[in-house]
Amino acid sequence: MGASIGRKILLELKLSLCRSLVSAALLVGLCEASLGQGDADLEAPGLPAFAATLTSGATLFQNVRIFDGKNATLSAPSNVLVKDNIIARISVSPITIEANANVRVIPADGRVLMPGLIDAHWHAFMAATPQMLLMTADSSYLHLLAARQAEATLMRGFTTIRDLGGPVFGLKRAIDEGVVIGPRIYPSGAFISQTSGHGDFRFPFEVPRVLGGSLSHSEVVGVAAIADSPDEVRLRAREQLRQGASQIKLMAGGGVASPYNPIESTQYTEAEIRAAVEAADNWGTYVTVHAYTPRAIRQALAAGVKCIEHGHLIDEATAKVLADEGIWWSLQPFLDDEDAPPLVNPVSRMKMQQVFAGTDNAYRLAKKYKNKTAFGTDILFDARLASRQGAMLAKMVRWYAPGEALRMATADNGELMAFSGSINPYPGKLGVVEEGALADLLLVDGNPLENIKLVEDPDRNFLVIMKDGTIYKNALPK
Ligand SMILES: [Zn+2]
């Protein structure tokens, strides 16, 4: 009797399981749309909507002189009409608007209008939060800190960042939906690293890894993806693409802050890097790699990589190869000055000195061979340093004219953003002031082409900050 009841229960269990599987499949079908973007209930009863989300429609900037992102001269006094999120018209003669049209007029009084700044190497999750906190705190707390920093980033005039590692898919979505304020984000998701590579931040006791075992903390959080073998690299790359990565970031050589690798080390094999390149290429995008040395750079190039991060220890021949092959070189002004990261580990400090020693040479070569050079800051683990994002750009005058540096952080970086091809999360032109471009604009109190130090103090000097046609700051005297 016991056995027959047992069978009956089993049968019922099977039936109900079957039914629930069918309904689960149906549900997935019905709810498909809600797995994507834009389905959150964004209303918070009792709270007013964000001021930023209220300002739709059109904006007319009257009497501006334009730095267009490309030419190192200002335009004649002009008028710029923004409609929705696009720069609709630029004209030296007055742009007339209908009397009752819903157009915000900004009398700029001859001030400079320029494209929003772009940081090609940023870590929205990690820029301003101390490393020890990142490794130990509750991740929901860390995400809230990142959201706060995203707003600060936009308020520094950086309307776009390319994120080169860290869990930012949720942050990007929340920004795009207007839940929180921040820049456009081109996410890489977790950076992919070999065991002992620049992205291996596990504690010494966490090896040997059990194949198929549980993930390490930084992998669970989504900062790093540790992968050894072409198959694992391919899987990890596809996981990032599945979540919305616009490009893939791989660690192809030694780094400063990572404990288990000499800076001279070459990481991964050509076959492993190529696995990521193929995965990215099949999605219409590219792989960029962290690499300082000629050997690490050359192995990555052989594997089909199209963008190099850092490269401070490059040699002349390799810089020329990058130029000849049209490879993007995303370089940062790392200098031994007041903004040098306060590293406590003596080995890391020594590695950092090596990088600092290479910075002048790297920029000299990038200029000599007219490399496709991107501007980025790669600020990590420090709120004060994060607040110096614009100051890092101002430092570029050590090697470039202000107009060249500003062009790099606007039009040139905009080109690199578009390099994510068919999966570009923000299709449209970024980094330029021209008709048809996306309306990311700064109104500057002064001429940054003459005095680039203006970008060091955005609170004071950026009077209007617009992203995607929405005004997030307007400090023009009324
Ligand atoms: Zn970085």
Image: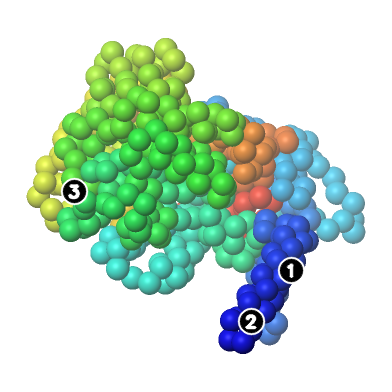
Which residue carries the number 3 mark? Answer: 259
Measured Cα–Cα span from mark 3 to mark 1 = 52 Å
Residue 54 can be seen in this image: no
Q: Secondary structure at mark 2?
A: helix
Mark 2 or mark 1: name the one nearer the start of the chain: 2
Q: Is residue 54 left or right of residue 379?
A: right
Mark 2 and ligand 1: say if the CB distance to the nearest ligand atom is below 8 Å.
Answer: no
Q: Quadrant of the C terminus?
A: bottom right
Tell me the tag on residue 19: 1
Task: Indicate the colouring scheme.
Answer: rainbow
Mark 2 vs mark 3: in front: 2
All told, the count of numbered labels is: 3
The disc labelled 3 sits on which kind of residue? Pro
Snapshot quadrant of residue 77: top right
Q: Give the Cα distance between marks 2 and 3.
A: 62 Å
Residue marked by disc 2: 4
Q: Nearer the viewer, mark 3 or mark 1?
A: 1
Q: Is residue 192 left or right of residue 464?
A: left
